[in-house]
Image: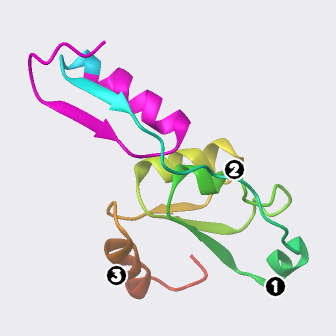
Amino acid sequence: MVTGAGPMILSLRSPELAAKDSLRLASYGLESIAAPVAISKPVPFDNQICDTADGFIITSQQAAAYLPPDSTNKVVYAVGSSSATAARAQGYHHVICGGGDGAALAHLMSTLPLDG
């Protein structure tokens, strides 16, 4: 319910994440509206190409849902803690967590051997 008593926060994420944002903001006494502008869905993809990859980069927790289930022995470079947690939940154990944005992850990867 919108009361107009304070600032209104609009969450422009996927439906699931916008709803989570609204609940979290409410726990801090902030009003918000979940206004999803995007959805995450798989597209046709040849999973055999995953066999040639040494690892994967994911930049969102939604992307973790599309990691190939038969490649959990490979490294995952995750942009931040939420995407790293989601990768671990998919069974990946070698997850390297970046600093929360693409630039920080790219910098981190430039300092590591690419085999993890």
Q: Could you tell me which secondary element the residue under label 3 belongs to? A: helix
Tell me: 72 left or right of 95: right
Location of residue 92 by image quarter: bottom right
Q: What percent of the width, then of the height, locates residue 107?
A: 34, 81
The answer to which of 20 and 102 lies nearer the viewer is 20
Separation of residues labelled 1 and 3 (CA atoms): 24 Å
Q: Is residue 11 magenta?
A: yes
Residue 52 circle label: 1
User: In the image, which residues are magenta?
Assistant: 1-25
Going by the numbered disc 1, the residue's amino acid type is Thr
Which quadrant holds the C terminus? bottom right
Instruction: State which tag comes first along the sequence, 1 or 3.
Output: 1
Binning the other alpha carbons within 10 Å of mark 1 as few (below 14), some (14 to 19) or many (20 upward) gives few
Q: Which residue is mark 2?
A: 65
Location of residue 32 by image quarter: top left
Q: Which residue is mark 3?
A: 107
Separation of residues labelled 1 and 2 (CA atoms): 20 Å
Q: Could you tell me which secondary element the residue under label 1 belongs to? A: helix
**CB under 8 Å between discs 1 and 3:** no
